[in-house]
Image (cartoon, rainbow, N blue to C red):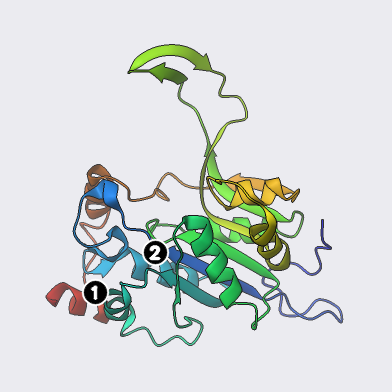
Amino acid sequence: MSERGPKSGEVTYLNARPIHTAAIIVAAGRGRRLGTEVPKQYLPLNGACALRRSIEQFLAVPGIDMIRTVIHSGDQDLYDAAVKTLSDPRALPPAFGGPTRAATTLNGLLSLQDDAPDRVLIHDAARPFVSTEVILRVMQALDHADGAFAGLPIVDAVWRTTNNAAQTSVPRDGLWRAQTPQGFDFKEILAAHQTVETDAADDVAIARAAGMSVAAVRGSEDNYKITVADDLERALAMLADEPIVHGTHSEMSAE
């Protein structure tokens, strides 16, 4: 485990320099389960796509110094349309993804090497309703662990099935549904991605395979991933009362 140093978001801590935190927004997926022609992260949600909303959520959090979005190489035009009115210099030009999610994340990490952040938060673009509170919980947990993830304890009964037939009840004690962001010491998670050979479910799996300590912090039911049509309908319902007043929202609605 690396030394923790000063706490997240502090400008000064005795004579130590402040901690620099970057965010990577993973946005290279194709979203095939949703069945739309346009990848889900670019679908308009009351005017602003999920990717734009995710970027804006992180820009609103104190202590986030830079944001790198990692996109599919064929989505440059979609990305440009999504961020064309975004002038915050912390939103860096995009990097391009790889053939798998792990490869995409690694490309994002490599693209930040010259900026040398101390910590990095990795977030799915298809989770546009992540809150400042959840992001800060992950950041604060990094004061005491190599990594941290947002999630929720499983409260429903869990069954293992075969051909839609119940077989075995799975004890749910200690089981969590992982969300993002997932935050890490930058150097350690970069090294883990470069050395761990695994078909990882997420970045926590890669971190644990490399021996990193990872804390779990409470996420939110609203911080769900848009994956299937029901999720898209839920997102639109959540935004039904939101006025379309942001310049980007109205411009994207007209396109």
Q: Secondary structure at mark 1?
A: helix
Let me know if residue 20 appears in the view: yes
Q: Report the amino acid beneath label 2.
A: Ala
- Residue 80, above or below 137: below
Q: Which residue is mark 1?
A: 249
Quadrant position of residue 244: bottom left
Quarter of the image with the N terminus is bottom right
Horizontal placement of 200 versus 125: left or right? Answer: right
Give the x, y percent position of residue 134.
53, 55
Rendered residue at 39%/17% (across/down): 162
> Residue pushed farthest right?
15
Q: Earlier in the sequence, mark 1 or mark 2?
A: 2
Quarter of the image with the C terminus is bottom left
Give the x, y percent position of residue 102.
53, 57
Let me know if residue 64 appears in the view: no
The residue closer to the viewer here, 234 or 161, is 161
Q: Report the amino acid beneath label 1.
A: His
* Label 1 vs label 2, nearer the camera: 2
Rendered residue at 31%/84% (across/down): 84
Rendered residue at 48%/82% (across/down): 92
Horizontal placement of 174 versus 225: left or right? Answer: right
Q: CA distance from mark 1 to mark 2?
A: 22 Å
The residue closer to the viewer here, 71 or 85, is 71
The residue closer to the viewer here, 98 or 156, is 98
Numbered disc total? 2
Q: Secondary structure at mark 2?
A: loop
Mark 1 surroundings within 10 Å by alpha-carbon count, few (fewer than 14), some (14 through 19), many (20 or more): many
